[in-house]
Image (tube, rainbow, N blue to C red):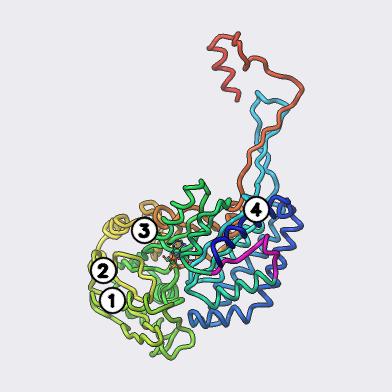
Amino acid sequence: MQNEEIVKLVENHKKFYTTGKTKNLSFRIEQLKKLKSAIEKYEDAILDALEKDLSKPAHESYASEIGFVLNEIDYMIKKIHSFSKPKRVKTPILYWGGSSYIIPEPYGVALIIGPWNYPFQLLMSPLAGAMAAGNCSVLKPSELAPHVSSVIKTLVCDTFETQYISVVEGSVEASTTLLQQKVDYIFFTGGTRVGKVVMEAAAKNLIPVTLELGGKSPCIVDKDIHLNYTARRIAWGKFLNAGQTCVAPDYLLVHKDIAEKLCLEIVKSIEEFYGKDPLESKHYVRIINEKHFDRLVRLLDEGKIFYGGQSKREERYISPTIIRDLSFDSLIMQDEIFGPLLPVIEYQTLDEAIEMINRKPKPLALYIFSKNKKIQDKVLEETSSGGVSVNDTISHITTKFLPFGGVGESGMGNYHGRASFDTFSHKKSVLKNTFLFDAKLKYPPYTISLKWFKKLLKLV
Ligand code: NAD
């Protein structure tokens, strides 16, 4: 799409928003239902596109992309009346007879920019929140998942008026032009580097942002655990989508007494999931492109490969890999891995593990496996992260009852369930005064003493 077309498209969204149509709850519900039906209609095309872009198995695609979004839409439809109700709050005695409340009001036009790793869910789930809150939306899918991008474009064009919801396909150029427009909200999911570009662009027009970013999510494993469940939950969270998940456990910090046993048990889980040769498995995903493949292969040079380490460039395949004998300062420990390589670093004391985590920027997710509540509590108390799963991986982001988002370098703002509605709503504070009386004391000329004036102010 040409730059001028993008400018015109955003203008048309603004015009449509000012008609007030999207503020009507029946309209919002009807459109959410249309979105749901369209996703159901396009289900096969979405699964096919995910298979083409990432070799995602249908079960994973359904659970983590389509099913997830359908659940969000259902929840929005069910809760929209209660979410959008003005909330009454107390009124100070000075305004006796008046009333105060908070009205959730749509921002206007929301720009939603998505990444390639869960290319359907990460555009459609925020879209459900934006629609429920009464906004118009422009979607910008990732160019690195072109088949999914194309299905999203067709689905949206086929379902909604272009002035209400539109899709701009393309890469950095399209994104840059979109970021120059005076939209009313920007919701970005992607890497920390681009997150900074987005925030800088938003600052120029003082546009509020949500940044859903990434980072290195640590996984601490104490020696007091259920070994088999721990290994299985780690292997699943790490090798799902071949490690290309923003909340995948990036690296393990394992108590030295259990490191060997745990690594062997993770190997067992990998072989249970994908067989002895994951290259042959229909359930194992490929790396998105050659650039990321080459980046990941370079990370195999340090440490000792305990398991895996095989790769095949023509197929963008890298096997599930466990790496040991690494230092915390090695290359693989510098940036988010975003691939199926699992570094295992041993610790002797929990303080040492916590100190290592706190040396790095605040992660998007943190995992702690331990039966010991004191250890769980100490980790929760002494570390900061977007979210935490205790004795599991990824699970805390799958529930609509918990807001999902990062902190510090892993992002700002959150969504999922109620949080999605709130994210796309401005909370407008309203105080309605009465005409029953007018407290003259607040007006000049000030006739009461400062002492009484101070007492009066306490009533506000
Ligand atoms: P990315 O930041 O490279 O790209 C994301 C989007 O931004 C794409 O649509 C892309 O076209 C656009 N973009 C790229 N460069 C741009 C620029 N200079 N200016 C404007 N727009 C630009 O991210 P990615 O590689 O698609 O995704 C991987 C990253 O996303 C990882 O770091 C991962 O952790 C993170 N991620 C975070 C979440 C989350 O929910 N927090 C979810 C998935 C992925």
Q: CA distance from mark 3 to mark 1?
A: 36 Å
Q: Nearer the viewer, mark 1 or mark 2?
A: 1
Q: Secondary structure at mark 2?
A: helix
Q: Is residue 21 above or below residue 262?
A: above
Please state the quadrant of the image where ligand 1 appears. bottom left
Instruction: Tell me the crowding category of disc 2: few under 14, some 14 to 19, or many 20 or more residues within 10 angstroms, Cα based.
Output: some
- Horizontal arrangement in the rendering, residue 371 relative to residue 138 (left or right): left
Question: Which residues make up the magenta segment?
Answer: 159-169
- Give the foreground label among 2 and 4: 4
Q: CA distance from mark 3 to mark 4?
A: 52 Å
Earlier in the chain: of badge 3 and badge 2, it is 2
Question: Do we see residue 262 in this rendering?
Answer: no
Cβ–Cβ below 8 Å for labels 2 and 4? no
Q: Which residue is mark 4?
A: 14
Judging by the rendered image, the residue that carries numbered circle 1 is: 298
Instruction: Judge the density around disc 1: few (<14), some (14-19), many (≥20) Cα neighbours within 10 Å.
Output: few
Q: Is residue 44 left or right of residue 142?
A: right
Specify the quadrant that holds the C terminus.
top right
Foreground label between 1 and 4: 4
| Left or right position of 119 against 329 | right
Earlier residue among tags 1 and 4: 4
How many numbered marks appear?
4
Residue 90 versus residue 5 in the image, above or below: above
Q: Which is closer to the viewer, label 3 or label 4?
A: 4
In the image, 176 versus 439, the foreground residue is: 176
Q: Earlier in the sequence, mark 3 or mark 1?
A: 1
> Which residue in the protein does label 2 denote?
331
Q: Residue at x 64, y 74 (%)?
A: 154
